[in-house]
Amino acid sequence: MAKFKVVITDYEYNSLQIERDVLSQLDVEFITAQCKTEQEVIEAAQDADGILNQYAPITERVIEQLNNCKIISRYGVGVNTIDVEAASRKGIIVANCTDYCLDEVADHAMALLLAAARKVALLDRYVKNQAWDYKKAIPIYRLRGKVLGLVGFGKIPQNLSLKAKAFGFEVIAYDPFLSQEFASKLQVELVDLDTLCCTADFISIHAPLTKDTQGLLGSKQFNQMKPEAVVINTSRGPLIDESALIEALRTSQIAGAALDVLENEPVHSDNPLLDMEQVILNPHVAWYSEESEQELKGKVAQNIVDVLSGFYPDYFFNRNIKNKVLLQEKSLSL
């Protein structure tokens, strides 16, 4: 019988060989599942020592039923599928991977911005329908000198700010957790959210999804925006009040949106965004490249190995429980 049991609650990858290879460092029974409900997670992972999670709900109810779990490691930067407070109360480490797709998401946000600004997708559709007429996309505005507003200024938007400046953008950001001194090093001005919404020509969202940030952009914010403004979201769909966004687009309060994420994924067939020419939709792909997927899979599995080997993981999200969970620092073992 294996020493440890590790359960993957759900996954959308073609192969789990990287995870298996990393976990083979230990004597592990690796169980795969495709859970969609709390009860399915409980049944699959109740006696697991470690859990790998993608989208399945790891709620307080689930965590109360975890008898042996020492770590929940999530594929991605965000941990919004996990009740972190409940895990912390139970002394379970929550881990993620914060640096596997810094270029990918920044590149994708810039690609969506450019596609929306230059109306690339719209013109593609017209040409394929035998309409060879640039006037179908009027108006298109010069990018140099425009203002890009970043909602959140972590590693990904910091990366994006450098790319945007190469196109001649002025960059401003809203992030209540950073200082102007820090932002100034990247020649970015920190402003409040109201100022950002009033000032920016393009608004790119990069905040984490929490109770405080859900619906961060709603009717008030859309009413403040320029009629030429375009909203880009490569973070999490619920950061935007989608019904308010749809209304702002319908009434031309804003000019467009380019969304890699939505409130409900996959997109529902009756979602009005599907029929809006001024909207670009992608299937939550900004994180992806062949390289980033491999890096993510290896790092989240290594989080499990670290904790089950008695070490704090490199990607320790709920560090406030460090004094409650007595493990070793990896550097001290060298």
Image (spheres, helix red, strand yellow):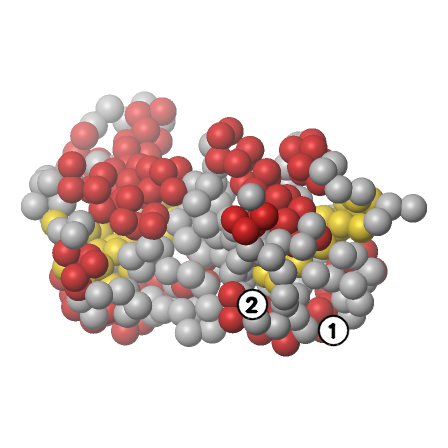
Q: Quadrant of residue 29?
A: top right
**Where is residue 294 drawn, in percent x and y?**
55, 33
Residue 228, image x and y in percent?
17, 53
The residue at 52%/53% (across/down) is 315
Label of residue 322 in the image: 2
At a point 75% along the width and 42% down the height, the residue shown is 26
Number of the front mark, 2 or 1 = 2
Relative to 128, say whether 107 is above or below. Answer: below
Residue drawn at x 78%, y 63% is: 68
Q: Answer above or below: position of 285 versus 126.
A: below
Q: Decide if residue 278 is on the left or right side of residue 82.
A: left
Asked whether residue 251 appears in the rendered view, the answer is no
Q: Position of residue 210 (x, y in %)?
A: 46, 68
Secondary structure found at label 2: loop
Q: Residues within 10 Å of mark 1 (few under 14, many from 20)?
A: some
Viewer-proximal residue among 122 and 167: 167
The residue tagged 1 is 64
